[in-house]
DNA sequence: TAGAGCCTGCGG
DNA sequence: CCGCAGGCTCTA
């Protein structure tokens, strides 16, 4: 569920709450239970022992907890994952898989009902070579994401749709279903348009559409439809800014035509048949 | 480069 | 009950 803006919002909320604080313990629950991969309990124990949090950062949809032990804990929230800060006295909710004990009887908890999420740990110097981060495309909010870089990535594909392109993390990293739909609407590009045949002018529009939709979503602290909450339980407000996502059957605010839904890669795509052209 | 599959929960 | 959900990985 969480895409770049939601993970960025979580990172910003966790940063002042965690940086400088010691981690006093670790609990990994339900050994037969696993996330996308088994939770590396022993490696986490080693990384966390006697360590403090040095930084909280984000890479695409990954949240990174950088520790004074020179290890980095990497968290991916999948579809239903959440990181919550709570007093140790509050009983953990169902589907709590990892708990980092902090000082002052507080805890950082990783909760994920559907278990599509991931917790991994790497020595800091191996992070960029990790299977998770190696091969990620440019993050659209990174300065390296220029219109030229986008055009080059587009032209490296072979006949996939522009929607599939945006969801492919090796091409552009951090965009998911909501913001792919929204960026394409802002750019006036039909989701079934072929990625490698986009003109430089339309690639530039897409570049602007991605930047705009993601920047705005960060400023509204993410989109809350159902599960998404920040670590303190607050919902985001960006759902009110969305132009097409989950608005099938409603009127386009720009041209008045009825918004439609189609299925691509087994995912719903929402678009305006009037504003978006192949 | 499309599909199925992985999971649980929710709303119709 | 069914279909659907903000993700990714593996397969043909």
Image (cartoon, coloured by chain):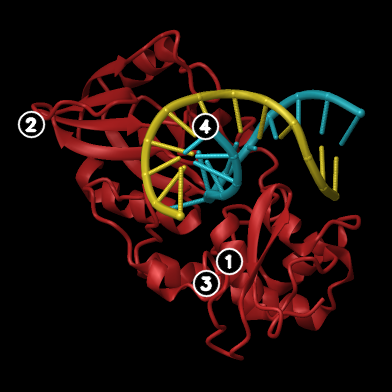
Chain colours: A red, B yellow, C cyan
Q: Using a 10 Å C-alpha cutoff, classify the residue at mark 4 as few (fewer than 14 neighbours), some (14 to 19) or many (20 or more).
A: some
Mark number displayed over residue A213: 3
Q: Is residue A144 visible?
A: no
Q: Are marks 3 and 1 in contact (CB under 8 Å)?
A: no
Callout in the foreground (3, 2): 3
Tell which circle, 3 or 4, labels the residue nearer the N-terminal end: 4
Q: Residue A73 location, x and y as percent?
A: 42, 30
Mark 1 and mark 2: Cα distance apart in space: 39 Å
Question: SS for tag 2?
Answer: loop
Tell which circle, 1 or 4, labels the residue nearer the N-terminal end: 4
What residue is disc 1 on? A143
Left or right, A135 with reference to A82: right
What residue is disc 2 on? A104
Mark 2 and mark 4: Cα distance apart in space: 31 Å
Q: Are marks 1 and 2 in contact (CB under 8 Å)?
A: no
Tell which circle, 3 or 2, labels the residue nearer the N-terminal end: 2
The residue drawn where x is 70% and y is 85% is A274
Q: Which of A248 and A179 lies nearest the eye of the viewer?
A: A248
Q: In which quarter of the image is residue A191?
A: bottom right
Left or right, A105 with reference to A138: left
Picture layout, residue A99 above or below residue A82: above
Q: Residue A235 location, x and y as percent?
A: 29, 57
Mark 3 and mark 1: Cα distance apart in space: 16 Å
Picture layout, residue A262 above or below residue A219: above
What residue is disc 4 on? A116
| Chain name for mark 4 | A
Residues indicated by labels 1 and 2 sit on the same polypeptide chain: yes
Q: Which of C8 and A137 lies nearest the eye of the viewer?
A: C8
Mark 3 and mark 2: Cα distance apart in space: 38 Å
């Amino acid at each position: 569920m969480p895409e770049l803006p939601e993970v960025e919002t979580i990172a910003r909320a966790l940063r002042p709450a965690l940086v400088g604080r010691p981690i006093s313990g670790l609990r990994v629950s339900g050994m037969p239970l696993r996330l996308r991969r088994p939770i590396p309990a022993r490696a986490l124990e080693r990384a966390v022992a006697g360590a403090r949090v040095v930084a909280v950062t984000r890479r695409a949809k990954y949240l990174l907890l950088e520790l004074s032990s020179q290890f980095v804990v990497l968290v991916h929230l999948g579809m239903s994952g959440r990181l919550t800060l709570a007093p140790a006295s509050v009983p953990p909710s169902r589907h709590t898989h990892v708990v980092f004990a902090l000082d002052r009887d507080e805890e950082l908890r990783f909760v994920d009902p559907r278990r599509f999420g991931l917790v991994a740990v790497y020595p800091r110097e191996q992070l960029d070579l990790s299977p998770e981060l190696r091969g990620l495309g440019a993050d659209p909010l990174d300065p390296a994401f220029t219109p030229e870089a986008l055009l080059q990535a587009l032209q490296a594909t072979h006949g996939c749709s522009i929607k599939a392109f945006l969801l492919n993390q090796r091409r552009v990293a951090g965009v998911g279903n909501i913001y792919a739909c929204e960026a394409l609407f802002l750019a006036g590009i039909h989701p079934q348009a072929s990625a490698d045949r986009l003109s430089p002018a339309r690639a530039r529009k897409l570049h602007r559409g991605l930047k705009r939709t993601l920047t705005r979503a960060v400023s509204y602290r993410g989109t809350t439809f159902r599960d998404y909450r920040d670590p303190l339980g607050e919902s985001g407000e960006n759902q009110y800014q969305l132009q097409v996502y989950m608005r099938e059957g409603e009127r386009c605010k720009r041209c008045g035509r009825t918004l439609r839904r189609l299925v691509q890669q087994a995912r719903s795509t929402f678009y305006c048949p009037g504003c978006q052209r192949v």
